[in-house]
Image (cartoon, rainbow, N blue to C red):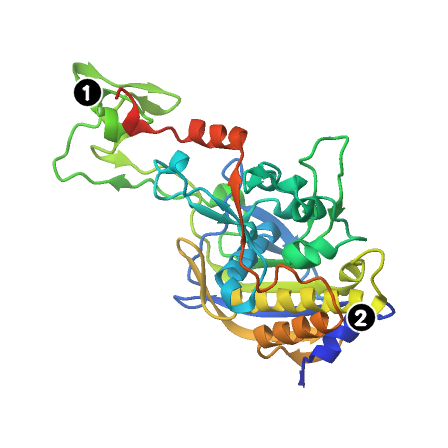
Amino acid sequence: MTQLTLSMLRGACDEDATGGAIVLDTALEPVGGGGTPVNPAIYSGGRYQHDKRWEGSNAAEPTSVIIIDNVPSQANRLEAALEATADQTGTPRLILDLTGEDFAHLPPHLPRRLSSLRWPHRNGDAYLRDALVDGSSFVKSPIGRSIINATTDAAAALVAWFPQSLLYGFWQSHLGSNRTQAKHARAWVSEIVGWKPASGGEPDELTRTLGVKGDPYNIQDTSKVDFDDADLLGSGWKLIEGEKSVSKGGKKAGAISNIGHGQVPADSGLAPVSFQRVSQRATLSFPQLRRVHLGDGFSDDQDVAARTVIAALGLHAHQTAFGRPFALRSGTDLLPADKTSRLDSTDVAIGNAASLLQEALEAARSLNVPTDGWGADPVILTPNKSLTDAIRATWPDLDSVGQ
C-alpha cells in the first residue's frame, strides 16, 4: 500500500489532473457486536430513510438498506470535529458571542459562543448577516464583505476564513433575492448505511412496543391539572380536584402525566434495527475541488495549493470524527472494524492527516495563498438588535416576569 503524500494530493488538485476521487470505505460494527440493533436517524413523519442499493456490479438485485446517518448529518459531524481540533490545527473561526448581559438569562443548554464551524449555512448563514463587529455591521467590514461576496471562482476569502464551505458546500441565499445567490456543491460526501435490516426494512414493521414509565407513588395519571407549559419551574401547577383529564387526539389533555407525574405509557415509535452489516463510504471529489479558484490576480500554482489545503482539511476532519469508535445518537455507538482507502485505483494509507494538513498549509503560505484566518485569534461577533430581540423573544427572561 502506498503512503498518501502531499505531492500526490497536490497532483490530484492540479488544473490538468485527471484524478477522480479519494474514496474511504469503512466497515462499522455496533459496540455491542455485529447484529446489535442501532437507531437510524428519524425524519419527518416518523420514518427512517429507506433505500435500495446495489452491493456490487455483479449483484443479482438491489439490497434493502436504511440510511443510519445521511450526507448533511455527516457534514455537521465533520465540522464539529474541525471545531474540536481548531486550536491544534489553526482552522479559522468566527465566534458569535452571547456572553453579554442581554443573554445572561439564557438556559444553560444553549451555547454562549457559537463558532462559524457550527453555523447551519456556513458562510451563507443569517448569523453572519446579522452580526456586529466592534458595534458595526460585520458584512460591511472588509473581511465580512469579502466573505459574503465570495464565489467558487473567487474563493480567496473562503480559503482564508471559511475553508469548510469548500468541502461541504454553501449557498449564499440569505441576502435577498436581488443580491448574490452564489452556491458551491459539496466536494466531500459521506454517509453511513445499514444493509439488509432484519425486519425486511418495511416502515410499518419497525414499531416499538408500548412501555410504561413507572411512578413509585402511583399518582393517578388521569388527574387534571392547570399549568403553564412554558415554565413549570417559575409558575408551578395546580391540581383541579374532582376533575379528570379528557382525551384529545389520542392524548390526555390537561393530564398530570403531561408534567411528569404518574405512570405514563411511552410514546410508540420506530424500533432500533439489527443489520447484517453497516458501512460508511466517504468520497472527496477532485473534479468538484478543481472548480475552486482564488480569483483574479492569483496563479494556477496558488489555486492548486489552496485546493490541497482544503483536501487535507477534509481528510483530517474524517480521521478525527470517525477514526476511532464514535457515537451518533442514543443507542448508535459504532466502531471501525475494517478500513480501506484509495486514490482512484491506487490503494493508499492516509497516515496522520493533521500533519498532512500542516504540510499543505505551509506550502500554501510559501506561495502567498490567503490564509489570514489560519492560526489567528477568532473574530468575535455580537448579534445586532434584531437578532438580539429574536433570541430574547424565543428565550424570555422568565425569572424577571412580575418583578
- Residue type beneath disc 1: Lys
Instruction: Say which residue appears at 20% left-offset and 32% top-offset.
Output: 262
Query: SS at mark 2?
Result: loop
Q: Is residue 32 left or right of residue 3?
A: left
- Residue type beneath disc 2: Gly
Number of residues whose C-alpha sits closer than 10 Å to that of mark 2, classed few (under 14), some (14–19) or many (20 or more): some
Number of numbered discs overlaid on the protein picture? 2
Residue 257 drawn at (x, y percent): 25, 29
Instruction: Say which residue appears at 79% left-offset and 53% top-offset.
Output: 154
Query: Can residue 172 be seen at all in this image of the molecule?
Result: yes
**Sequence-wise first label, 1 or 2:** 2
Residue 246 marker: none
Quarter of the rendering containing residue 355: bottom right
Q: In this picture, is 87 found above or below 259?
A: below
What residue did someone put label 2 on? 19
Residue 4 drawn at (x, y percent): 67, 79
Residue 238 marker: 1
Q: In this picture, is 381 found above or below 160?
A: above
Q: In this picture, is 403 found above or below 106?
A: above
Residue 76 drawn at (x, y percent): 55, 53
Q: Is 26 in front, or is 234? A: 234
Instruction: Say which residue appears at 25% left-offset and 40% top-offset.
Output: 213
Residue 312 drawn at (x, y percent): 65, 69
Cα–Cα gap, marks 1 and 2: 69 Å
Q: Is 42 in front, or is 171? A: 171
Q: Is residue 331 left or right of residue 402?
A: right
